[in-house]
Every structure is written in structure tokens, then in C-alpha cells.
Image: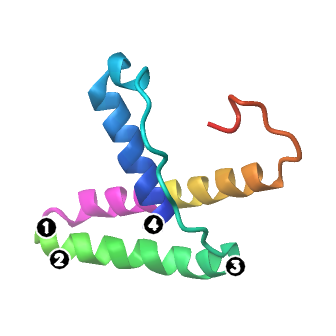
Amino acid sequence: MPAGLAALCAAALALTQAGPAASQTSAAPIETTPVSMKTADSNEAADVEARINTLHQELGITAAQEPGWSEVSEVMRDNARQMHAAIEQREQAKYLTAIDDL
């Protein structure tokens, strides 16, 4: 998972767990490192496949669990494709409202 995406997910999780009171306090901005889209594009599919293979090994998926695991891995691939498309759409937008920029 790219570092920027991981930071975004961590921030979103922290906000949802903290509740409304936390969103009203000031917090230090999250620093992210810009990633070249060309590099991200070329590595995205390989990163997803590597993560799928790592999880497969770490979870010890058995032959009996393989059909279900195939569905999970396909959802992971679909999510990566959808995330990539959303990021590209946002980068190509000429005008973003404050809501769009969230």
C-alpha cells in the first residue's frame, strides 16, 4: 500500500474512532510524501499482488479455504483499480470545491 494511502487510511480510522469531539480540536497536519504517479502506476498491480500473496501465506490459507480466498483477493484487486481511478479523476479535476478536496 502506498505510504500516502496508508496515512490517509490511518487518519480516517483515527477520526472515526475519536468521534465528533476530536474533529473540533486542532490537530497537526499529516505530512505525506508525494509519490510519482508514473512510479505508482507501474508498481500498483505488483504491490497488490505482493500483499495478496503475503496475506495468503501469513493466514495459512488451506485448500478448503481457497475458493473463498479467491473471492477476497479479487475484491482486493477491484478495490485497487477503483482507488486508482478515483485518484486519477481527482488529479485531472480543474476545480475542486472544499468538499471535493476532502
Estimate the x, y position of residue 6 in percent, counting from the top left. Answer: 41, 58
User: How far apart, in angstroms, are the residues tagged by discs 3 and 1?
Assistant: 32 Å
**Mark number displayed over residue 3:** 4
Using residue 94 as the reference point, say whether residue 38 is left or right of it: left
User: How far apart, in angstroms, are the residues tagged by discs 2 and 3?
Assistant: 29 Å
Q: Nearer the viewer, mark 2 or mark 3?
A: 3
Residue 24: which quarter of the image? top left
Q: Helix, strand or loop at disc 3?
A: helix
Q: Which residue is mark 1?
A: 59
Viewer-nearest residue: 20 or 64: 20
Viewer-nearest residue: 70 or 39: 39
- Magenta residues: mostly which secondary structure? helix
Q: Helix, strand or loop at disc 1?
A: helix
User: How far apart, in angstroms, are the residues tagged by discs 2 and 1?
Assistant: 6 Å
Residue 62 showing in the rendered view: no
Estimate the x, y position of residue 64 in percent, counting from the top left. Answer: 13, 64
